Image (tube, rainbow, N blue to C red):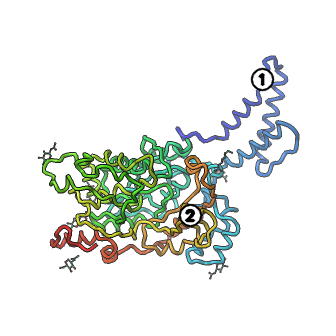
Amino acid sequence: MKDIKYTRLDELLDDNLEEFEPSESSITLKTVLIGIFLIGFFILFVFYFNTNLKLHADGKFSRRISMINGKLKKLKYKNATKFEDFYFRKSETQFLQCSEFLEDNQTSIDQYVSHGRLRRDKNTTFPLKMDCDSIKTRLFGDLPAFESLGKSIAFVRNAYTLYELQEVFLSMNWHPDHFFCYALDRKSDEKMKKSMRKLDECFENVIVLEKEYDFDRKGHRQDLAHFDCLERLLDRNWSHAITLQNFDMLIKTPRQLSDLSDLLNYTSIMGFDYGLKDRYDVTADWTPAGMKLLKNETGVPQEILHKKMVVRKSLNEVILSKMFVKSIFEKLNIDKVIQRFDDDKRFGVDEMMIMTLYENYLGLDGQMESNCVKEREDKLTRLNYWNLNQPDGVNPDCKSNWLRHSLCVFGVEYLKEISESPMVLGIFFVESEFDLLMFSANKVVEDFDFGTVLCVREMMKSGKTGKNPDTDWLASNFPQFREMEIKANGTFVRGSIEC
Ligand SMILES: *[C@@H]1O[C@H](CO)[C@@H](O)[C@H](O)[C@H]1NC(C)=O
Ligand SMILES: *[C@@H]1O[C@H](CO)[C@@H](O)[C@H](O)[C@H]1NC(C)=O
Ligand SMILES: *[C@@H]1O[C@H](CO)[C@@H](O)[C@H](O)[C@H]1NC(C)=O
Ligand SMILES: *[C@@H]1O[C@H](CO)[C@@H](O)[C@H](O)[C@H]1NC(C)=O
Ligand SMILES: *[C@@H]1O[C@H](CO)[C@@H](O)[C@H](O)[C@H]1NC(C)=O
Ligand SMILES: *[C@@H]1O[C@H](CO)[C@@H](O)[C@H](O)[C@H]1NC(C)=O
Ligand SMILES: *[C@@H]1O[C@H](CO)[C@@H](O)[C@H](O)[C@H]1NC(C)=O
């Protein structure tokens, strides 16, 4: 509680006393005593009748009573018997039936949707106890004891909206063997920033960078923040990092991700698309020598130094092996390439840099060596449903009937698919102040189904997550995995693999 200032009951009442202090200095003792008596009475009154108090007296006094009454109601910390009780009233969650939704029971889904999906924004959250013990109780008080994992993951996330959403995400992914780093948006409100920083204080394996960033919808500063986090985590013992944005929801358990990392060995996971010409400077010098990309050019083949890199593209979300990340920091002037892509005049700038470094041979450890000229989608990282070139809003092609930025918003209608998906994460949108700040013309959508998030947690808890991919599946979908297998067999010749 020390440095997190949530309004407390005593503070609230103190404020109130001050406000009732008369402004004229020539006030009599009698008036003061009557005042104190009235306030005392009023406080008791509020204490005993705060649940359904409605005073109909006129004037300032009654307005203050109902205002304080409202605050008192909100100030009651919730005693949760179930996880969702920390964040929602029982009356709100009465139609949340995760186990039915996961079975795709249309009746229960319709019932939930017709009574209004669960929503939270910063105006409707409950006060949460923010001491470390309370946070830990919320995050994993209802989970079985943690068992140690083989491989550790670094979760690297750029965050900007609602603390509660990030807390629930963390409650699904946190494990003592994993690592977490957050980069916060400068425009996030103070409460969000302070609450996130509290996580850093409470957990040895959670880092929240001191530096804050100017994120926007065009993807600016995303790569920079991810790499600042990766650098901070470099001396920790993880084998893969997963880069995430604010709304990305992991749909696999901490153990499944650890097992996946084991299977991947030093392979990184991303797709093989080509950069769109309006998203980067096509006229710039893209040779490593011209970009001063390498820290040390001595002994680097001319073929690497002077070969123009081809700009590749996939998603912002990728799975990176420690070997590859380490080599990037060791061998490259990473700030140069971050700046090159983080072009303020362009849109969608955060989906090219890592692929460009991974898919053009630069002599980095753990990178793809073969030149894969095909376009290949990343079939592991992100589950989403595109409906391109259609306006935001009601859209019957989406199961949840809502489209935003060309993506179907995940409502509880998608839970069955999520629970059967081989993918590692789903993208989930919550409408935010952030978008309003950046794009005032952007239509304000308010679709926000927190029920999906709560049920995914339930899904993980009950072990109903989709199967992890096996080596055959990885080999058939990812040329970089196949390349690794061939290398392990000792039969690899660069450029030899079919991709
Ligand atoms: C919550 O539980 C504590 C102890 O278990 C109790 O003292 C407190 O009154 C309860 N609060 C509410 C709002 O029920
Ligand atoms: C589906 O959910 C409804 C409402 O909760 C329930 O009454 C019904 O038994 C469920 N159907 C099946 C097949 O489980
Ligand atoms: C929250 O409340 C403020 C002040 O009443 C309002 O300006 C803002 O739009 C609200 N935000 C949301 C997300 O509802
Ligand atoms: C790092 O983690 C690996 C398992 O991924 C383990 O085998 C190794 O002993 C760990 N190294 C240190 C220094 O803790
Ligand atoms: C990757 O696989 C090779 C064998 O091909 C093995 O020697 C090495 O230890 C593995 N590395 C990791 C990080 O698991
Ligand atoms: C640069 O690389 C060469 C060849 O590997 C090496 O001999 C030299 O020490 C390196 N220079 C620096 C400054 O690291
Ligand atoms: C690697 O070698 C093993 C054993 O010789 C073989 O079964 C396997 O198909 C090879 N894998 C690849 C990718 O070449």
**Residue shown at 84%/28% (left/top)?**
34
Residue 330, percent from left and from top: 24, 49
Amino acid carrying label 1: it is Ser
- The alpha-carbon separation of the residues under discs 2 and 1 comes to 50 Å
Residue extending furthest top? 26
Residue at x 36%, y 59% (from the top left corner) = 153
Tell me residue 210's x, y (percent).
43, 41
Q: Quadrant of residue 304?
A: bottom left
Q: Which mark is residue 23?
A: 1
Label 2 near ligand 2 (CB < 8 Å):
no
Residue at image position (51%, 49%) is: 160
Q: Residue furthest front?
A: 283
Across and down, in percent, residue 106 comes to: 63, 78
Q: Residue furthest right?
A: 57
Classify 10 Å Cα crowding around label 2: few (below 14), some (14-19), many (20 and above). Answer: many
Q: Which residue occupies the foreground of this view, 178 or 221?
A: 221
Q: Is residue 368 above or below residue 221?
A: below
Residue 38 vs residue 475: left or right? Answer: right
Question: What secondary structure is found at the residue carrying circle 2?
Answer: helix
> Which residue corresponds to mark 2?
454
